[in-house]
Image (cartoon, grey):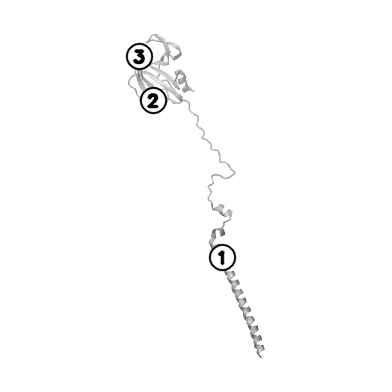
Amino acid sequence: MSDNKNTGRGIYGKGYYIALILCAAAIGITGFLYYRSENEARQVLQEPEQQMTLPASAVEEDIPVVVTQPQGTQAPAATEPTAAPKKPLKTAAPISGETVAEYAMDCLSYNETTRDWRVHNGVDLAAEAGTEVMAAADGVVYTTYADDMMGTTVVIRHEDGYTTVYSSLAEELKVSTGDRVTLGQAIGCVGETALIETGAGPHVHFSVLCNDAAMDPAEFLALGSE
């Protein structure tokens, strides 16, 4: 009887230890799996940016781009407006009168007042004293003054570098410096104020400059007919 009891305890004792070992192994495996899952979750929480990498195409679409011109095409060339043809300068003689002294810059002309031969940079147009003297073209009065030799004088600037000068006028003028005048507008009257030309009687000494160089008034007046 005693042998059977001892045999039964041995069998039951070994089974108890086997069960205990299996339980311990199960606990160990469960703990390892739990630790592994926790570690992976911790890595995901610590590195969120590395887990959210956008594709290159998505990044490019989100960047605003200022397009000034489609690629592969050229902007149309700017066309300059065609300038209207320039009208020729209209001119006319300052008075209608007899020419008593011609333009003479390439030769000597006899002066009745000084009784000598000298150059003459304009034309002397005779008329009755008080006859109105007109602007020979559109322009702006550059200056007015009393010259010791040529008397009361008006200087008018015109386009294209032309300047007209009216001397031997009566003292009272009809324009002032800075006035804009038009072709045929009265600027003064015929006088006898040019001391160096008193022998010519009442007249206007009319001279013309082109880019500040003397020119024949006849050539200037010819512009009005072109």
Label 1: element kind: helix
Q: Which residue is mark 2?
A: 141
Q: Residue 170, position in %: x, y?
A: 34, 19
Label 2: element kind: strand
The amino acid pointed to by label 3 is Leu
Q: Residue 120, position in %: x, y?
A: 42, 14
Task: Classify residue 189 by image quadrant.
Answer: top left
Query: Between residues 186 and 39, which one lies in front from this camera angle?
Result: 39
**The label number, if any, that marks residue 39 in the structure image:** 1
- Label 1 and label 3: CA atoms lie apart by 120 Å
Query: Between residues 92 and 161, which one lies in front from this camera angle?
Result: 161
On the question of residue 46 being in view, the answer is: yes
Q: Residue at x 42, y 9 (%)?
A: 117
Location of residue 16 with respect to 111 vertically, above or below? below
- Label 3 and label 2: CA atoms lie apart by 24 Å
- Given this view, does label 1 or label 3 mark the residue nearer the observer? 1
